[in-house]
Structure formats: structure tokens, C-alpha cells
Image (tube, rainbow, N blue to C red):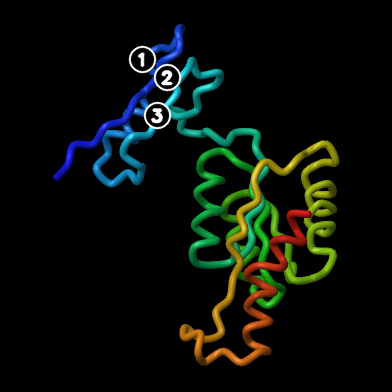
Amino acid sequence: ALPISNLVFIKRGTRASDLVSTLSFLLEGRSAFVDGQTWRVGPAKVSNALSSRPFDGRLVVVTGAARGIGAAIARTFARDGATVVAIDIPPAGDALAKVANEIGGSALQLDITAADAGAQIAAHVASRHGAERRIWALVHNAGITRDRMLVNLDEQRWASLMEVNLAAQMRIND
């Protein structure tokens, strides 16, 4: 194996504790980075790295939150202090309500492909969490598969897959 070489610039005033995340990343055997990179580290303004609730006071929206990975994401953000808005399609309403109730968040039954999905999310946040609240993070977890083999997708199935997995996120972000 070839030696790996990277350069870490440390700004004046940097404490050892400010270096922990950078050095941990560089020394972890599974980290993915390019040999020969430079890293610039300075004093941390706010350090949540060691906090058990790094998302306190944050509002996070998670789509596809009724089950599976989406529910796990919602639970993790809630565990770490965030207020979570859990979103999923109306047919998943019971499971969605269960997740939202479990984590103390709110549930929004919404088909994210609706043209006004972004506006509906904003209205829900304002009505349930206060007009002054701002979304700190939006996790686009909702997605569909119609067939695990691309060759088997007809034009209609491909269009619905692209609508849910890509176009809806773009509209919501706008």
C-alpha cells in the first residue's frame, strides 16, 4: 500500500477539541477522501459534536416518514432534539400518525407530487409550529421503485418514478 499524505492547516486560537472531528475523519480507516487534500481547521464557533441533542430548537421535515428509512430518520432527528414534521402519502396515514405521535412531532398526509406541495408544507409548519418557525432541514426520503430492472420500465412507470424521486423534490425546494 502507498502512504497517504494530507496537510492540515491549523489557524491560531484553535483548541485541541476543535480538531477532533477532522482528525477522527482522517484517521478512520473507512473514511473516503482523496490523498493529497488540504484541510483548514479553525476555532469552532459552536460545537454540537459532543452534545447528545445537537438539533435542539431545529425544525426538520422528513418525507416518506411512515415506515422504513424515513421513520428511522425522523426518530433519529427527534432523539437528537429536533422537532420533526413527518410527511407521507394519505394511504400511509395510520403509520404516519403512529411515528409522529411516538416522536412528539406532527404528521402531514401529503402526496409530494402535488404542484403546491411546498406551499402545503410551509402552511403546515406555520399552523402547527408557529409562523415564525423556519425549516432547518428537509430530508427528501420519499421515493418509489416500480421495478428493480430499468429495462422493465415502460414510459408511464418511468415518468411516475421520475416525478416522485426527482421532480417533486425540485418543486418543493423552490
Image spot of residue 69 (x, y percent): 49, 62
Q: Secondary structure at mark 2?
A: helix
* Circle 2 residue: 18
Query: Which callout, 3 or 2, points to the residue nearer the camera?
Result: 3
Q: Earlier in the sequence, mark 3 or mark 1?
A: 1
Give residue 89's quadrant in the image: bottom right
Mark 1 falls on what kind of element?
A: helix
3D distance between C-alphas at marks 3 and 1: 18 Å
| Disc 3 target residue | 38
Cα separation, mark 3 vs mark 2, equals 17 Å
Q: Nearer the viewer, mark 3 or mark 1?
A: 3
Seen at 38% across and 34% down, the residue is 37
3 horizontally vs 27: left or right:
left
The image position of residue 159, as x and y in percent, is 68, 82
Q: Residue at x 67, y 62 (%)?
A: 87
Q: Which residue is mark 1?
A: 16
159, 112: nearer the viewer: 159
Left or right of residue 81, residue 134 in this image: right
